[in-house]
Image: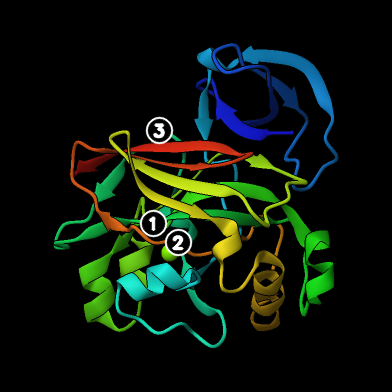
Amino acid sequence: MRIARFTTGDDPRFALLEGEAGHEVLHVVRGDPLYAPLQPTGQQVPLADARLLAPVIPRSKIVGIGRNYADHARELGNELPAAPLMFLVPNTAVVGPGDPVVLPEGSTQVDYEGELAVVIGRVCKDVPRERASEVVFGYTCANDVTARDWQRGDGQWARAKGFDTSCPLGPVIVPDLDVADLALRTRLDGAVVQDGRTSDMVFDVPDLVSTVSRAFTLLPGDVILTGTPAGVGPLAAGQRVEVEIEGIGALSNPVVTR
Ligand code: MG
């Protein structure tokens, strides 16, 4: 099942995305599936007539996880953290599929980071590892776009990872996906630049949900970014960056300057 958020020019609506590539149809559902049972209205919209939006706008927070793939920690000269390394990203950083990533003025190196994103479905706190799946609504692709020079210089990562347009999410949310070992690839203008597997995470998704929920009460629509595999590198205006995860789809965004 693929849950999409879309617009045809009016207010955003939610739908189940069905059909083969090139002939996909949005089956509109009532309300927001995070808060209401999935109930089709009977209305159908061809995907070609709609624009997909970020499938979720986090109500309270995005919790990012740093250095959760050993090869990536190594490529930037960092030690592996002994526990999940957390940072917060504001919801104003979120953009959707096809939306531009706007390179922030004053940064000299803005990197892509393809990641699996976990969308939380229930209010929860202190979730045991073995019950983590009960609080997960579904999964989507993310690009944890990072101003690397600001990350190094600021000490805090708020600006480096939280500037406007730094968190593309999408294209859809897939519930009930086994995310233990999925291929994750990032492409830059079509060339593969990151080629990882979620099985290479240092802390897996149940660990992350459990540990994050011990620090923060999680709310429906909160998002956890699970870290990026090796191969991060800079973006330039005019390029297109795409994060594809097996079983979810591809999140594609152009890169622009203001
Ligand atoms: Mg990251």
Q: Which mark is residue 190?
A: none
Q: Is residue 12 visible?
A: no
Q: Secondary structure at mark 3?
A: loop
Relative height, residue 124 to residue 84 (above, below): above
Mark 2 residue CB less than 8 A from any atom of ligand 1:
yes
Mark 1 residue CB less than 8 A from any atom of ligand 1:
yes
The alpha-carbon separation of the residues under discs 1 and 2 comes to 6 Å
Residue at (78, 70) in percent of width and height: 124
Residue at (70, 76) in percent of width and height: 213
Q: Secondary structure at mark 2?
A: loop
The residue tagged 2 is 228
Label 3 neighbour load within 10 Å: few <14, some 14-19, many 20+? many
The residue tagged 3 is 98
Residue at (63, 60) in percent of width and height: 222
Q: Amino acid at mark 1?
A: Glu
* Colour mapping used in the image: rainbow
The residue tagged 1 is 113
Closer to the eye: label 2 or 3: 2
Tell me: 230 left or right of 58.
Answer: left
Location of residue 121 in the rendering, given as x and y in whole percent from the top left corner: 75, 56
Q: Amino acid at mark 2?
A: Thr
Ligand 1 positioned in quadrant: bottom left
Location of residue 219 in the rendering, given as x and y in whole percent from the top left corner: 70, 64
Q: Secondary structure at mark 1?
A: loop
Whether residues under marks 1 and 3 lie with C-beta atoms below 8 angstroms apart, the answer is no
